[in-house]
Image (tube, rainbow, N blue to C red):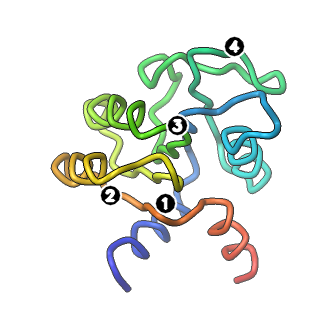
Amino acid sequence: MDKIEQNKKEMLDRKVWAVVGATPDETKFGYIIYKKLKDFGYKVYGINPKHDQLEGDKLYKNLSELPEKPECIDMVVNPTVTMATLDEIHQAGINYVWFQPGTFNDGVIERAKELQLNIVYFDCVLVALDEKEEE
């Protein structure tokens, strides 16, 4: 099993997640991913400085506002925002980061590796959850 597959398996076994880019807009992946993680029984915190809530759940402005440290971060933002969030993730002591397609570039992946984060990229968490359900 390669490192990314190993990270994916470990992340799906973790139960506390934060979705950076969670949004009340039902047409966006930030909404769809947030909901699907919750539907699968994960404890999920949404992070989005532009919105206050998602279906009655409080959305947080940044990681430092969260009431507990998530085990995994799912990035659903553009690569510029992703890059700006990596140091915050590292400083918070969070080791697992899932980069949704479109949320990263070579610089983001390089920086994540420099910070020794356990990462998944090119894979979509929605697909991974469906595969997990079929096991």
Asked if residue 75 lies left or right of residue 118, the reply is: right
The answer to whether the residues at label 2 and label 3 have Cβ atoms under 8 Å apart is no
Q: Which residue is mark 2?
A: 118
Tell me the quarter of the picture where residue 18 sits: top right
Q: Position of residue 99 (x, y in %)?
A: 46, 52
| Label 4 packing within 10 angstroms: few (<14), some (14-19), many (20+) | some
Q: Which residue is mark 1?
A: 11
Q: Which residue is mark 3?
A: 77
Rendered-image quadrant of the C terminus: bottom right
Rounded to the nearest whole Å, what is the CA distance between mark 3 and mark 4? 17 Å
Nearer to us of marks 3 and 4 is 3
The answer to whether the residues at label 2 and label 4 have Cβ atoms under 8 Å apart is no
Q: Amino acid at mark 2?
A: Asn
| Secondary structure under the numbered disc 2 in the rendered image | strand
Q: Amino acid at mark 1?
A: Met
In the drawing, what numbered circle is on residue 52? 4
The answer to whether the residues at label 1 and label 2 have Cβ atoms under 8 Å apart is yes
Rounded to the nearest whole Å, what is the CA distance between mark 2 and mark 4? 29 Å
